[in-house]
Amino acid sequence: MREVAKDVFCVGGTDVNWVLVREGSDLTLIDGGWRGDLPAVERSIRALGRRPEDIRAILLTHAHLDHLGALNHFHDRYGTPVYMDPAEVPHARDGRLEQATPLDVARRAWRPAVLAWSARIIRAGALRHTSVPHARPFPADGPLDLPGRPVPVTCHGHTSGHSAYHLPAAGAVATGDALVTGHPLTRRHGPQLLPGFFAHSPDEALAALDVLDGLDADLVLPGHGLPWRGSLAEAVATARERAAGT
Ligand SMILES: [Zn+2]
């Protein structure tokens, strides 16, 4: 776990990240890893001297199994509300996730590192059917009344209801899978889109970079890969160049 900006913590799980934002004794959790990452999510909260009950809400970037693993446990055990883009709510609630399976991925990108990754994510819960029946749309437009005052940023494409979260005071954006900086499948590091077959709509995923481009921030907190420092405009330009194959 790293404190990447004041009161903002980026935590790595099984090839996926989540973000904790602190305000006094309260926390916001952005994304929840795989189901198998649940003990690590709780550990990361306790490492800050807080308890899971101190999470005021979980914000989901998108309903993929590697991001929603902790949600049901937190809701059932601690009553934690879970918010996401209104367009993502139906996917989460009924479990019809717009997600490539490990087998799809292995078929398209076979190499030893991919097989090792597939084995890791299957252990972490990649084959478990999951729905989030208590998923709710954001309670308001604009900044949310939660630690860090996160502002949802609509960037559909990776899924049709994907959202990033701007943390204006920290100058950071939790970009989820709309903009990542690395993945076991890509070999490259730095700002980039995930391979097209991961995206519900690759064209929309590319267009969604326009929205991130305009944000006033100099820290990218991606769903996959390491935190990246630099302007969002620079990160987006790099991702666009890579997507164009230049
Ligand atoms: Zn992901």
Image (cartoon, rainbow, N blue to C red):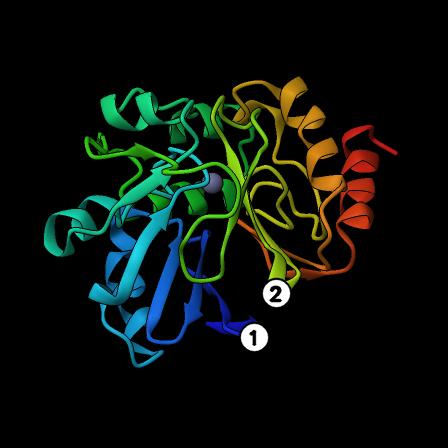
Quadrant hosting residue 46: bottom left
Residue depicted at 75% across the width and 49% down the height: 232
Task: Please tell me how crowded label 2 is: few (under 14), some (14-19), or many (20+) other residues with Cα within 10 Å.
Answer: some
Quadrant hosting residue 210: top right
Quadrant hosting residue 121: top left
In terms of depth relative to the viewer, which is nearer, 189 or 58? 58
Q: Is residue 132 left or right of residue 202?
A: left
Residue depicted at 66% across the width and 36% down the height: 193
On-image quarter of the C terminus: top right
Q: What is the distance, in whole Å, between disc 2 and disc 1 at their CAs?
A: 7 Å
Q: Residue furthest bottom?
A: 49
Q: Which residue is mark 1?
A: 6
Amino acid at pointer 2: Ala
Disc assigned to residue 39: none
Disc assigned to residue 170: 2
Residue 173 position within the rendered picture, expressed as x and y whole percent measured from the top left: 61, 52
Task: Please tell me how crowded label 1 is: few (under 14), some (14-19), or many (20+) other residues with Cα within 10 Å.
Answer: few
Amino acid at pointer 1: Lys
Q: Contact (CB < 8 A) between labels 2 and 1? A: yes
Residue at disc 2, CB closer than 8 Å to ligand 1: no
Residue 117 position within the rendered picture, expressed as x and y whole percent measured from the top left: 44, 46
Q: Is residue 149 above or below residue 138?
A: below
Residue 63 position within the rendered picture, expressed as x and y whole percent measured from the top left: 38, 33
